[in-house]
Amino acid sequence: MQNGPVTNELLPVSAAIEGGVLSVGGAPLPRLAEEHGTPLVVYCERTIREAARAYREAAPDALLVYGTKAFPNVAILRLLAEEGFGADVSSGGELELARRAGIPGERIVVHGNNKGDDELAAAARLGALVAVDALDEIERAVAAGVRRALVRVTPGIEADTHEAIRTAHHGSKFGLPPHDAIAAIGALRDAGVDVEGVHVHIGSQLLHLRAAGMTVEWLALFSARCRAELDWTPRTIDLGGGLGVAHVPDEAPPSIAEFVAAVSGELARAWALERLEPPRLVLEPGRSLVGRAGVTVYRVGSIKRASEATTYVAVDGGLSDNPRPALYGARYAALLANRADEEPGEAYAVAGRHCESGDLLIERVPLPEPRRGDLLAIPATGAYTLAMGSNYNAVPRPAAVLVADGAARTIRRRETMDDLLALEQG
Ligand code: PLP
C-alpha cells in the first residue's frame, strides 16, 4: 500500500515547516535530534492539551481518565491531571505511575484480565475503582479489600478495527459474557462491594461511530435486564477508550466532539427509552489524546536497492520503539524533517534496524531521494509505540521529549547500555 505524502492532520497542531525544516512546538527537529540523539519521540504539549480540552468540553460532567497504556509516563499523566483527567491503568506498574503523578484513587480505574493479588491490594489501598474482569477475581478482590467496582461486560459487538485491538466480541479474553456479568454484580454486592456500574471497551483505533452507538444501545438493554434480575441499575457507565487517529492520509476518524456527542446522545436516548436513571459517564481515551502529539525522529543510515521494485531506507530504530507495523500491519506516512519542502519522488520502504524481516516501519512511502544522515520523521506515533517497545537485539529504547514554546523537556530518558547490562547476572 502506497502511503500518501504527510498532510497537516497527521502532524501535531504546532508543526511548521520553515526553510525545509520541520519543527514541533517551535523546536526544529534537527536541533532536537542533535541535542537528544535519535531515535527520539517528540511530543507536542499543545496537541495533548487541546485534545484533553476537547473531551472536557464535549463531556463536562463525565469522569475522564487517560488510557495510560497508550504511553505510560509520569509527566504526561501530570499534564493530563492539570486538564482534569484521572487515569485508567492495567497493571501495578501503570498504577504506580499514576500514583507518582499525584492522581487520587477516586480518579483511577484499574483494569486487567489477570490482576495479581498485590495489584488488587494496591488498588484497594488507593480507593480506586476496580473493573472486575473474571468470576474468579471476585473472591480475591474482596479479600484484597476492594470496595468500589465496575463489572466488565462483553456485549458481543464486532468493532470495525484490527482483530488484535478488538475487545468486546463474543469470545474475547476481556470481560464477562452478559449472564456471568450479572452473576458477578450479584456476588460482589452480596460481599458488600459497591458495584458502581459496568464497563465496556469495544476496541481501539475506531474510525466509525457505529460500533460505539450500538454498544451504548446494548448497554441500556443490559441495564434494564439488571434491573429486572437484580433490582439494581448501573450509576456509572464506563465506555472505555477507542477513538482512532489518522496515521496515514486515508484514515479519517471522527473528531473528539463528534465521537463524544454520538455516545452521549445515544446514552441519553437509550436510557430514556428504558426509563433508566441517567448514569455518570466515564471515558478512557488513550490514543486520541497522545497519538497525534507524537512524532518519531530517526536518522537515516543505509540505503539499498534490493530489487527493481524495492529500495530500502534503513533507520536507527524500528521494532524496539514501534512494533505496531509488525504486530498489526499498522500503516504510517513519513517525511524528511531536514528537507521537508522537497517534492517526494520515488517510493521507498522504511526498514528498521532489527534482525527481523518483519521489522519494516513503512512498506512504501514517497520521499525525496534520501541520503545517509537525513532525519526521517514518522508522524502520529505518540500512542502504543514506545509503550510497546522492547530491547530486542539488546537495543536501548529511545528518549521522549515534550516540547512547547521552542523548549524541549526530557520526559523519558534514553536507555543506555548500562541499563541493559544492569539486568545481567553471572
Ligand atoms: N480502556 C481500556 C480498558 C482499554 O483496553 C484501552 C485500550 O486498549 C483503552 C481504554 C484506551 O484505548 P484507546 O487508546 O483506543 O483510546
Image (cartoon, rainbow, N blue to C red):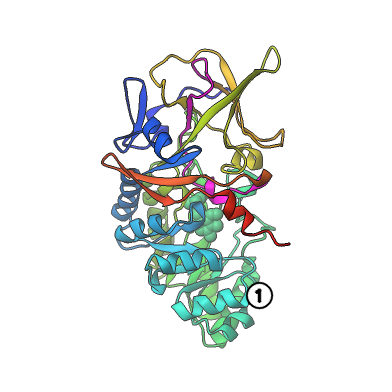
Q: Residue at x 41, y 27 (%)?
A: 7
Q: Is residue 275 visible?
A: no
- Give the quarter of the image for residue 144: bottom right
283 lies left or right of 28: right
Q: Is residue 412 left or right of residue 139?
A: left
Check the image and name the residue furthest to the left: 405
Q: How many marks?
A: 1
Note whether 425 is above or below 332 in the view shown: below
Q: Locate residue 311, reporting x and y percent.
A: 63, 18
State the extent of the magenta-drawn residues as a range.
366-392
What's the residue at 30%, 51% (across, down)?
A: 53
Q: Is residue 11 above or below residue 216?
A: above
Front position in the image: 315 or 167: 315
Which residue does the image show at 31% across and 46% down from the upper left?
Answer: 50
Is residue 10 on the magenta stretch? Answer: no
Residue 320 x %, y %: 61, 43
Q: Nearer the viewer, residue 370 or 122?
A: 370
Up-down: is 74 above or below 35? below
Residue 74 visible at all: yes
Query: Which residue has dot 1 on it?
Result: 135
Identity of the amino acid at label 1?
Leu
Q: Which quadrant would the C terminus be assigned to in this image?
A: bottom right
